[in-house]
Amino acid sequence: MRWILRIVVVLVALVAVVAGGVALIPAERIAAMATAQFQRLTGRELRIEGGVSPRFWPVLGVATGPVSIANAEWSDEDGPMFAADRLVIEINASALLGGDIRILGLSAERPRILLERAKNGQENWVFGGGGEGDSAGEVSAATPGVGRAYTLEKGAIRGGTIRFVDHAAGRDVTLDDVDLDLAIPDFSGPFTLKASAVTAGQKAGIVAEIGVFSAFTEGRVVPVTLSATAGGSRLAFDGRAGWQPLVAEGTLEADLADLAAVSALAGTAAPELPQGFGRDRLAVTGSFTLDEAGVAYLRGAMIEADGNRLSGDLDLAPGKDRPKLSASLRSPALAFSTGTAAPAASGGGGGSAPVAETGWPKAEIDVSGLGAMDAAVALVAGSVDLGGLKLGETRMVVTLDRARAVFDLAKVTAYGGEIAGQFVANGRGGLSVGGDLMFANLQMQDLLSDLIGWDRLIGQGNLNVKFLGIGNSVDAIMKSLKGEGRLALGKGEVRGLDVAGMLRTLDTSYVGEGQKTIFDGVSGSFSMADGVLSNGDLKLQAPYLVATGAGTVGLGARNLDYSIRPVAFPGEDGTGGVMVPLRITGAWADPTFHLDLESIAREKMEAEAKATEARAKAELEKKLQEELGIERADGESLEDAAKRRAQEALEKEAGKLLEGLLGGN
């Protein structure tokens, strides 16, 4: 910044140098003097084509033809750092005779400016130079007018182009149709700047009033009031700032409704934010501070993201690979649209009309934003609506490290109970989600209604689940789920299904509105693999009914294949009663219930076969027992009795033999 200002002043000073004897000096000589002096001061070549044309009336000044300033030697970009079709400088002649420099006009026609930062941090707007031009004091001594107070009535750029290339960050931003107006009425007072441009089809502009121009030229902190626009976005700052080093302190108001325009100005792609994260509206206000290390602080912040409002404090620090956000935020209520809510399911049969099964969303989930920064955010919210899941008071800490987000749930109230544990969304090389969650005392009807649109299960329960899913869409994640868990319910009921009535009448019409199965408790464990949940130990206790269950639930395919073995009206010892297996198949939205009578017949045939086999075996054992003269003891098998009888006979014969041998002596 300091060198840019000095370049302008050097050119103005040249007017003063030639003013007295300009009529005696050829235009070519004036141009040569200007280019030589400029190169000595900056180390860059200044080329003026067509010479310098002096002007005497109505004001004193000079006009040039095409002008260019060479780029830095290390640059690989083609073309000069600065080029313009024409420069015009006009000064107040009477003031100049009195020793003052009052610039009436300074304009550049169609300037083209290239600002460039190398990978090693070198910047092409930082000029070199030799001899006397290496410091402000030496420049002032070598060049009349530089270092002295001056004013500028009107500085203007029309139809310009500014291109910024950052090789380190991989950014390339071009501003077209640049119009700029600058006024410095008092060297030791405030000055005003107004500029507009177009980038990537988006309009941008800035209006600023900056105090104490003389201090600002040296990079010192001065009062600053500015308003900037980018498309439909607005930013306002009122406070103090300096640029060497870059520091600021004041109030900040930002309305970032047009993120596409802001992103175009920054040379990045616009993020695709979901509803609730600032897709339609994003506004920020607070007390802003930027320190010498480049750390930005926002205190007393108010953030509005669509309908969500948060308050708190935020810190944003630069990092080696990416910035890091630290924040403590609070909100009375948050609502987000995740696009994962399931369509309502009828529960099947009876008076409920089937609902078409639409499946899980297959749209690709963009997780590129997870890699934009690292973060550690503490959040307290009165409620959180996730579209498919509604939470009450929520206290969590969100940690984001190299595109991996971890949600530590310290306390989450939901559905009459609480949720605790950890949830992870990993965007490193694709997307995976996982967690280890505990749900305590949750009302299952409300929970399942929100999650999968099924409201038939009424009861309070506990659920523990560990899971992992991989994929770039909700559909892919659900079809890849693996993990394990356990469910336990207290007293409740299953609406739309009367299992006892089915068993009593062997009639599947006991499905539908008005039907229900009341239970005292349900428990079971499950495993998940490839998006299929498997269970083999379901137990249900109900008045006049006990049941076990086993089968699969297609979490990805959204279907069922499950069998329940209920026994109605069993005896006090749990035996007896009526048992007819019930099988549930089909889609979640419209499952089919049917009594498995074939299973009953098959089990009866198997039982009769086992009974026949047992009778035949008993008759055979009886016959062998009679023929061999074996008497079985209580609980002794025929085989064991035969072995015992043979052992006894062997021992008896051995005794006789031994007695004979001893008697023979």
Image (cartoon, helix red, strand yellow):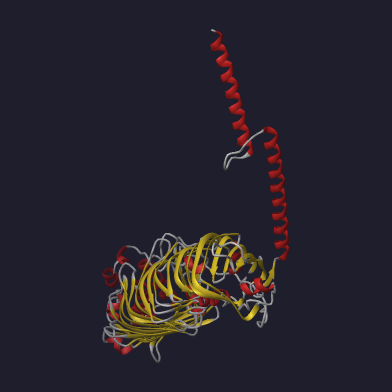
* Rendered location of residue 580, percent (x, y): 66, 66
Position in image of residue 548 (x %, y %): 58, 63
Snapshot quadrant of residue 120: bottom left
In the image: residue 515, left or right of residue 267? right
Residue 192 position by quadrant: bottom left
In the foreground, 395 or 264: 395
Count the marks: 0
Residue drawn at (72%, 59%), measured in percent from left and top?
602
**Residue extending farthest top:** 665
Residue 264 rendering spot, x and y as whole percentages: 51, 76
Q: Quadrant of residue 470?
A: bottom right
Residue at 66% over, 79% down: 355
As displayed, is residue 18 above or below residue 437? below
User: Residue most toward the front?
Assistant: 663
In the image, residue 503 sits, relative to residue 468, either above or below, namely below
- The residue furthest bottom is 58
Left or right relative to 399: residue 210: left
Name the one closer to the observer, 623 or 263.
623
Q: Position of residue 341 (x, y in %)?
A: 56, 76
Residue 272 showing in the rendered view:
no
Up the image or down, 320 lies above or below 441; here it is above
**Of residues 141 and 239, which is closer to you in this image?**
239
Q: Which corner quadrant holds the N terminus?
A: bottom left
- Using residue 110 as the reference point, say whether residue 125 is left or right of it: left
Q: Is residue 198 visible?
A: yes
